[in-house]
Each structure stands twice: as structure tokens, then as C-alpha cells.
Amino acid sequence: MKATYLIFLIAPAAWAGADSTPAELAAQTAQTEIAQHPGFAPAYARLAMAYARRAREADNASFLDQAQDALQKSFAVAPGNYDARKAQAFVLLGRHEWSRALDIAIDLNKQTPDDITNYGYIADAKIALGDFDGAVEATQWMLNLRTGNAAGLARAGRLRELHGDYKGSLEVLQMALDATSFGEREERAWLLTQMARVHLEGGEAKAAEDSTAEALAAFPGYYLAAAVRGEIATHSAGAH
């Protein structure tokens, strides 16, 4: 149960409804920006980020292919530009290409040491590669640079979980949830799902079920929460 967290062109009209996800809205905004400024490289990088986020929302890796297409357009406009390289690291994490993502994130961190996002990517890659000490260092930098930021707290919660500190993990994940906007519905659902998984690992099946219910209320049909619910059912069946 120590799964690593992490983590398409659709007509904009299809995303205009109130039920659009945060990633869909971000993609729509980026597409509008590209239509208005087709020579602006960061807009393509933002589109790539939106597609990569959508991949996690929908559990659909084909969105990562669309993200890669957007990155290629960004690099075509401005070779090696910072925004696209940062988005590239995120896409590589989504593809579980940990070492490549880590190399890019480390290089970007050297360029801009106060960008906490790069520290987050370093932490993610190092967790996946088993370098927990390195992940702790990167996460601590995130929290030093911006106290109480949700991204840093989420990774701190994961690291506490990996060290068997379930109570501490839940406390920090709750802090991350409190720091996350209600508009970021998938991010909140993701955090609640992580909390559910930690509850389950700590033997608290009821609390785990309650957290998955909150996750599904925040983001209906969320596949990660549904998967944990399946684990809860299996756990409960084995207890009888």
C-alpha cells in the first residue's frame, strides 16, 4: 500500500459548463491565450500543464501525449524555455520517468533556487526512487521558502507516512487540505484520498471510508477514491 502519489484536445465549448474540472478550465484558458497570442511560448507550457493535470483527474495517459505535443510547440517558439522545461518535468513524473524528471528539476532548481515547484518535483522523483533523505531535504526547502504552502505540506505528509508516522501524516495532510482552495476540487479530493489511505494503513477503516466519501463529494466519480474504497472493502472482509 506504499503506492507513489503523484500523479487531448477537446473543443473548448465542451468545457464551458459549470461541471468543468480545474484542469479542463485551465486548458480552456490556455487555448484562448494561444488563439490570441500564438507566438507566446508560456501559453503552450500552461496548456501542457493543464493536460498533465487532466491525466491525473481522468486516469487517462493519452492526455500526457497531448501535453507533450503542447510542449513541442512551446519549444518550437522558444527553444529550451523555462516554463516548458518545468512543465516537461511534471509530464515526465506523470509518465513515471523519475530519473529524467529529476535531472530536469535539479537543473531548473539551479537556475531559479526560489521556485518551490521545482523542489516539489525533486521530492516526488526522489520518493519514487527511494531517496527519502533527499526528498525530506527538498520538501523542507519548500516549507522554508513558503511556510504553510499546500504543496510542501502534502509531500511532508507523504514522507511522514512512509516513515510510519500515521498520526503526524494525517495532521500535515489536514493542514494541506485547509490550505487548498475549494475551487481546486481534484486536488482536495486527492488529499482526502491520501488521508483515507493513511487511515487505512493505521487500521482505521471507518475514518478511511469517511475520507473517501468526502473525496467523492468534492470530485464525484474520482477513481483514486473509488480504488481506496475497494481496499477498505477488502480490508473489512478480511477482518471478519
Image (tube, rainbow, N blue to C red):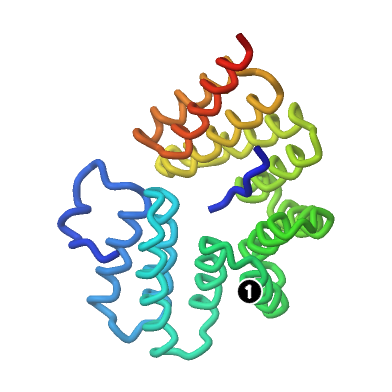
The quarter holding residue 24 reads bottom left
Q: Position of residue 120 (x, y in %)?
A: 65, 59
Q: The N terminus is located in which quarter?
A: top right
Q: Position of residue 19 (x, y in %)?
A: 25, 41
**Placement of 67 over or under 165, stated as above or below:** below
Q: Position of residue 192 (x, y in %)?
A: 54, 33
Pick out the residue farthest to the left.
Answer: 13
- For disc 1, the marked residue is 100
Q: Is residue 48 left or right of residue 18?
A: right
- Callout count: 1
Kind of residue at disc 1: Arg
Q: Residue drawn 39% across and 28% down?
A: 217
Q: Is residue 70 left or right of residue 153?
A: left
The quarter holding residue 237 reads top right
Q: Position of residue 200 (x, y in %)?
A: 63, 25
For mark 1, give the secondary structure.
Answer: helix
Q: Residue drawn 39% across and 89% down?
A: 77
Q: Residue drawn 81% across and 57% down?
A: 137
Q: Residues within 10 Å of mark 1 (few under 14, many from 20)?
A: some
Q: The C terminus is located in which quarter?
A: top right
Pick out the residue farthest to the top.
Answer: 240
**Placement of 202 over or under 236, stated as above or below:** below
Frontmost residue, 2 versus 186:
2
**Placement of 33 over or under 238, stated as above or below:** below
Q: Residue drawn 62% across and 70% down?
A: 101
